[in-house]
Amino acid sequence: MSWYAYIIECKDGKLYTGITNNLERRIRDHNSGNGCRFTKYRAPVELLYSENCLTRQEALRREAQIKQLERVEKLALIETK
């Protein structure tokens, strides 16, 4: 099973980073208000970046790395894909 680290942009322009093993379902959850507290009132969201990871642990590690980045660094990462 593949895991993904991803970045979405909310309607207010804020970026959210998370992980999932089903990217389409997770984005659908965020847009329906069932994704997480952060995106609940910020929908709709748009997927800007995703990175395939082999394991959940690898995805969690990558999520933590991405969350440490400044906004400008996250936007630069998005531009690389």
Image: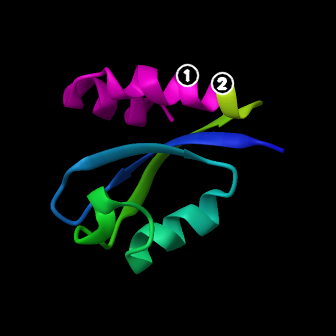
Mark 1, residue position: 61
Q: Which mark is residue 9?
A: none
Residue under the image location 44 percent in, 65 percent down: 35
Q: Quadrant for residue 9, please give it.
A: bottom left
Where is residue 39? Give x, y as percent: 31, 62
Q: CA distance from mark 2 to mark 1?
A: 5 Å
Q: Main secondary structure of the magenta part?
A: helix
Where is residue 54? Give x, y as percent: 77, 30
Where is residue 65? Give x, y as percent: 43, 20
Left or right of residue 39, residue 36 in this image: right
**Magenta span of residues:** 58-81
Q: Amino acid at mark 2?
A: Glu
Residue under the image location 55 percent in, 22 percent down: 61
Q: Is residue 14 above or below residue 24?
A: above
In the foreground, 79 or 30: 30
Q: How many marks?
A: 2
Q: Which mark is residue 58?
A: 2
* Quadrant of image for the N terminus: top right
**Secondary structure at numbered mark 1:** helix
Left or right of residue 48, residue 3 in this image: right
Can residue 28 be found in the magenta stretch? no
Labelled pair 2, 1 in contact (Cβ < 8 Å): yes
**Secondary structure at numbered mark 2:** helix
The residue lying furthest to the bottom in this view is: 32
